[in-house]
Image: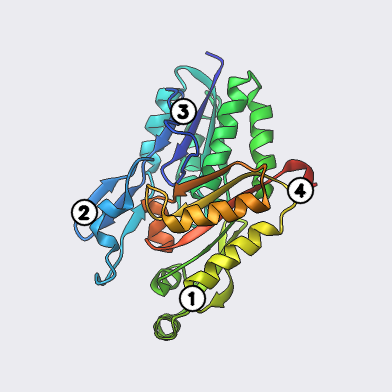
Amino acid sequence: MGGIAIVTDSMARFTRPGFPADPSQFVASLRIVSDGQFVDETPETDLHQIAGFRPDLPAGPVAIPPSIEAFTQIYSRLQKEADHILSIHASARLSATALHARAASQQFLGRCDIQVIDSQSISVGQGLLVQAAADSVARGETAEETVRIVRGMIPRLYMVFFLERLDYLERLGRISRSQALLGSMLGIIPFLSLEEGEVVPIEKVRSRPRAVEKLIEFVSEFSRIDHLSILQCGPWPTEESRLIAERLQGVHPDAPISINCYGASVATCIGPESMGVVVLEAAEEAV
């Protein structure tokens, strides 16, 4: 006993191949439901394997969060080896996962210290927090210090992205059906950010090349970056993503840059053809 276990959910995506590999690190699966298909998502799930993302279907896919019972079972198993569990989850404004985790944690009061953290992020943003927690545990730091590190990173995480399909913005409740139809006819591409876990429209552009330029302009505003991830819809880097990475490496030559698929559950929110960036600002710049 005395160890620290880490739990997250499958909305997270990781920049390290094979992560997580430690049995004390667990990823709870969201279930993707669409067109009669049920897929329990893992970090390796390819959203292109899910037919429901076709634009001709009347209702797109839905991501069902892990249940309270599922988290109860996970915590019950992990507490046999750990006194502390750190549960880091997708933005509570986009998924009920953190809410379910927090409800399950109440059953362990007095038996196991379970800290549930709303990452206020998704995909790689969430994954960077999980990796940082794992690194802290590996260094032998306490649960309290690990929580402090993770919470301290959240304000330094930024995510911007653009959507090719406005029906996903309608699903997020940011525009009406009539606005989605009109915007699609006009070829509008919305450019958005994730602010305190909520999707916020920033502006509209009229072409994908201009949307890509907006991504590059956003990243160029930072002085120093600890990590930069380019988010795309496929598992293998596209030519577009590689070109963006090359341009951003020129702006931030010392920053680690990864190209990652944002995942099927995230695609239920932003669609299968979107692109974005996640920035972890350097700690000294965020002060």
Seen at 59% across and 27% down, the residue is 135
Q: Which mark is residue 286?
A: 4
**Image disc number at residue 25:** 3
Element type where label 2 sits in the image: strand
Calculate the distance from the C-alpha at mark 2 to the C-alpha at mark 3: 28 Å
Q: Amino acid at mark 2?
A: Gln
The disc, 2 or 3, on the residue closer to the chain's N-terminal end is 3
- Residue 152 in the image: state x and y as whole percent: 70, 41
Task: Single out the mark in the foreground, 3 or 4.
Answer: 4
Q: Earlier in the sequence, mark 2 or mark 4?
A: 2
Gap in angstroms between the C-alphas marked 1 and 3: 41 Å
Per the model, the C-alpha gap separating discs 1 and 2 is: 33 Å
Q: Residues within 10 Å of mark 3 (few under 14, many from 20)?
A: many
Q: Residues within 10 Å of mark 1 (few under 14, many from 20)?
A: few
Pinpoint residue 243: horizontal percent, then vertical percent.
51, 56
Q: Residues within 10 Å of mark 2 (few under 14, many from 20)?
A: few
- The residue at which mark 2 appears reads as 37
Amino acid type for the residue under numbered disc 3: Gln
Q: Position of residue 223 (x, y in %)?
A: 75, 51
Q: Give the quadrant of residue 109.
A: top right
- Which residue is tagged 1? 207
Q: Quadrant of residue 284?
A: top right
Image point 45% across, 23% down: which residue?
22
Name the element at disc 4: helix
x then y, percent, for residue 199: 55, 63
Q: Can residue 158 be seen here?
A: no
